[in-house]
């Protein structure tokens, strides 16, 4: 297998995405994760552009990476000065990276309009910036910005810019589809022509504006390109950069090109999730290879076939990339799936015990009514405990009432809840206000129960999601509420379903509190 | 420009996505939108698989589409019976679509393992299912399932299955990458070989499991394929189908292939958003061509260049697909956008009138708070009317109260609303129950107002959607409610936003009723 090197730019080009902003510590943590995964180059930032990037290069020097090389990004020198006087180039060298990557102009239009210099001057700029860097950095790469657009506009000149880099004995020339508009067949034709003129190893840097970044990168690899630049999860400005989470497994499993060590591929999903977490983004369900839905099957025809021969409806075995097959619960699937789910939550069910079968039917019936235990593992655990008789009743709610009131057209609404609970022999009757009925009810429940269980004060409601489920045959549409809560130690999700949104929220709130009480009791018991 | 026909399967394959489930009414609305956009074929469902799909084909018959043809999906006949006895094929014909599309097996492995018949029997099955359908339907397409995987396993047999379809004189043969695992260069080689053997027009149906569905479809088009199957926003099982929102503009603007009428392309973003709304999904920010970030620029270098020469960092002009350039962290966008929106709803605003500028700022501020007028055109129209002083106040709500009550742990919840309204000089004070607080409030409002405006009895609440908006800096999270209502003549959407779900629902309900009253008065006035 021939080797294709991975150049990750999550920490530089990836941070150009709207809403992505990593702390220096996040960047260091991600760099470690990328290094462990086997990425060859990690582009850490543009030290000439901001102090945060300078700090990263300083901090990363103190860390021990197992194999990855750290790259710093910058541009060719400005016009009319020598490289040794150019502040951008000086900063690049001062950052002491293992690799320096600079970009330069390919497109004649940009040379004239953005740089406002002659075409020949631009060639000098490329050549002597690179020649100077080669003398001061261990490895030097050249990013040919707008290469494909430049080539389409003026192929001779575009090739000349690459020749200038080649003459400077640069280690790799990267062809960039900066605007992301290139079609895969055009890209292939252009690369074939470049290879006639350039002997330096070539790389590809694609953007996803045409939804072709992954395909363009793979196309380039199939034509002998030896370095792929991209980001984890395809993060990046506008529509993102080429997604390494889709490129790496395709090269390894479909094209028999080695990139990261083969055994690391099983950590792909974990890496993807890790970067989502640090970016504070929800992972994309439908993301190829690593998404929750990537190997999920709904249709009945598919499901039975999948069970006999997974390859019939899966392009590869999900385990290879750290993912797994999921059979979605619909009327067609069911028991096997629920048993698998119980196992996932470490609850042992014996599929042959008639009591178990009854439980399973209950759960299936609940799922048909719109319950969903993805993201509501706490409700699932409580449900199983109730059914198995291992559930302890810490309290009961005798009744409650929520009032939402607007006394005058121009007045703000008021929400108030009253509740009556019973703990042991004692009854507590109280009331609370809130922002909206659910918040009022949540406040009232806690107020009533905190008296008996002070540790409930630690619980915070972190997220609240409502979905109106489409009406089934002959039934009113149901409302599903998902609540995520947490305390200092952990986070848990609960669910409620009803035709009444207050009732659905109530169920999820009660489960949230019961789960907390069970959890605390279990952790106390284990400590004894 | 040569013509490539668009075959949309959002309503069939798109609904295989986890969490996507359209009501029959949603499907009809989407079909209208696709028809207006200029899509050639709309695959409405698999009538043999479920009663909801049967209902769609019945309902769509009553609608007037301007040009799109409706296709029904199914499979080849079962083994050992003739097509006229096959329930699946009978149901397809009974649905009376303009086109019937059936899939059959290409992959020898599937024939043996899934169908458990001989390879020759499968060829007969393909041939005589199609021959029979050709005699009973105006147009017949053949989806060669798993074509590329089948070809890789056994090219001779894969071609034979296509030949069987060709002999049945089918109108188009669609090569399907069912598992979505095919690489673009492999796909190209295989299509080139197919074209040596098959003269029937060819189509492509790609899935996105390798993140190559768009590129694969475009690659196929560049090789002369004349029908592209896909879905709006790439909805579909697992990682989705080929995304028509990326394929259509690439064909039109980059490949000079005609598909939908050129002037329709400006409606691309609107179409994408419409389908997201009905699916109750947040649009993907980074989606190519149509996403909010698709033409957003963050980097300072980019921004100044963009302003001088947009083509320097944009692969095409965003206006061509109904999108716009956004410069992040600045106030440069906004106004032009809102003016464009007002124009869309046929309200004339003069951008230079200072009153107009004030209105525009208000609207912008509302959008920042979470209002969204996509899918809530009625609220937008009312808002403009209120601001322009052309709004008539038919009634005022003096106050209301909603009570949700559970009197005992095991009892069902009760929701009751009271309301006091004033119409002319008269006050009406009344109450009603409902399934949940919003339904109770809706019932009470109507009960109070129907006395004065009997035509409100015609209004039906068709859909209710809730979205919890992420919290901004220092603000509580807001709740957006979208309500869709209709009477015999039309349908309209309204929106409300508040930190209180009852308040947000109340706003949307009031807009719904005001819109109906305005609409009726205007239509009466125009009749006089």
Image (tube, coloured by chain):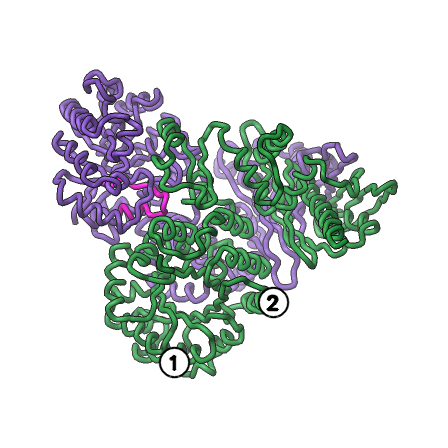
Chain colours: A purple, B green
Q: In terms of secondary structure, where does tag 1 sit? A: helix
Q: Which chain carries label 2?
A: B
Q: Which of A305 and B60 is in front in this view?
A: B60
First to last magenta residue range: A204-218
Residue A41 x, y percent position in the rendering: 24, 34
Does the magenta run of residues contain A212? yes
Q: Residue at the location (75% across, 32% down)?
A: A411
Q: Residue at the location (59% across, 57% down)?
A: A369
| Total numbered circles | 2
The quadrant of the picture occupied by the N terminus of chain B is bottom left
Where is mark 1, residue-wise?
Answer: B128
Does the magenta run of residues contain A486? no
Kindly identify which numbered label has been placed on residue B173. none
Where is mark 2, residue-wise?
Answer: B62
Q: Do labels 1 and 2 share a chain?
A: yes
Mark nearer the viewer, 1 or 2: 2
| CA–CA distance in space, label 1 to label 2 | 32 Å
Compared to residue B470, the image places residue A467 above or below, namely: below
Q: Nearer the viewer, residue A435 or B463?
A: B463
Q: In terms of secondary structure, where does tag 2 sit? A: loop
Residue A246 x, y percent position in the rendering: 32, 47
Q: Nearer the viewer, residue A272 or B329?
A: B329
Residue A471 x, y percent position in the rendering: 62, 58
Figure quadrant of residue B304: top left
| Residue B68 appears left or right of B314 | right
Q: Residue at the location (80% across, 38% down)?
A: B398
For label 2, the crowd category at 10 Å Cα-Cα, with few meaning under 14, some 14 to 19 and many 20 or more, is few
Q: In this view of the protein, can residue A313 be seen by the observer?
A: no
């Amino acid at each position: 297998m021939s080797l294709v090197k991975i150049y990750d730019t999550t920490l530089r080009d990836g941070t150009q995405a709207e809403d992505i902003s990593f702390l220096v510590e996040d960047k260091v943590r991600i760099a470690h994760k990328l290094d462990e995964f086997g990425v060859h180059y990690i582009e850490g930032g543009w030290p000439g552009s901001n102090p945060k990037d300078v700090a990263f290069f300083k901090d990363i020097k103190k860390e021990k990476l197992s194999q990855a090389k750290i790259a710093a990004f910058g541009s060719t020198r400005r016009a009319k000065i020598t490289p040794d006087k150019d502040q951008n180039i000086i900063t690049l060298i001062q950052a002491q990276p293992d690799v320096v990557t600079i970009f330069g102009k390919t497109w004649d239009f940009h040379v004239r309009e953005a740089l406002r210099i002659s075409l020949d001057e631009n060639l000098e700029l490329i050549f002597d910036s690179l020649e100077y860097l080669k003398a001061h950095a261990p490895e030097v790469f050249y990013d040919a910005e707008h290469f494909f657009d430049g080539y389409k506009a003026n192929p001779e000149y575009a090739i000349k810019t690459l020749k200038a880099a080649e003459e400077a004995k640069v280690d790799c020339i990267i062809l960039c589809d900066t605007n992301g508009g290139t079609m895969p067949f055009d890209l292939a034709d252009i690369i074939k022509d470049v290879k006639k003129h350039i002997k330096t190893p070539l790389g590809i840097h694609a953007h996803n504006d045409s939804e072709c970044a992954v395909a363009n990168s793979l196309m380039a690899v199939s034509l002998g390109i030896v370095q792929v630049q991209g980001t984890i999860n395809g993060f990046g400005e506008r529509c993102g950069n080429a997604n390494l989470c889709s490129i790496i497994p395709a090269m390894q499993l479909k094209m028999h090109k080695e990139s990261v060590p083969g055994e690391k591929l099983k950590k792909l999903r974990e890496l993807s999730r890790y970067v989502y977490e640090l970016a504070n983004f929800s992972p994309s369900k439908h993301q190829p290879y690593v998404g929750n839905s990537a190997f999920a099957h709904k249709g009945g025809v598919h499901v039975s076939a999948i069970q006999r021969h997974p390859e019939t409806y899966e392009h590869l075995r999900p385990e290879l990339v750290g993912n797994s097959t999921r059979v979605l619960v619909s009327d067609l699937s069911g028991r096997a799936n629920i048993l698998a789910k119980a196992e996932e939550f470490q609850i042992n069910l014996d599929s042959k015990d008639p009591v178990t079968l009854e439980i399973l039917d209950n759960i299936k019936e609940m799922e048909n009514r719109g319950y969903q235990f993805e993201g509501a593992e706490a409700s699932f655990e409580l449900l199983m405990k109730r059914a198995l008789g291992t559930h302890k009743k810490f309290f009961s709610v005798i009744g409650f009432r929520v009032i939402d009131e607007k006394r005058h057209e121009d007045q703000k609404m008021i929400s108030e809840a009253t509740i009556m609970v019973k703990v042991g022999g004692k009854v507590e009757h109280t009331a609370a206000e809130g922002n909206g009925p659910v918040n009022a009810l949540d406040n009232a429940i806690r107020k009533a129960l905190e008296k008996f269980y002070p540790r409930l004060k630690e619980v915070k409601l972190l997220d609240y999601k409502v979905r109106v489920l489409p009406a089934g045959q002959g039934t009113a549409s149901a409302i599903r509420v998902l609540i995520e809560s947490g305390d200092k130690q952990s986070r848990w999700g609960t669910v409620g379903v009803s035709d009444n949104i207050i009732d659905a929220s109530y169920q999820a709130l009660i489960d949230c509190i019961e789960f907390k009480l069970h959890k605390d009791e279990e952790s106390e018991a284990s400590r004894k």
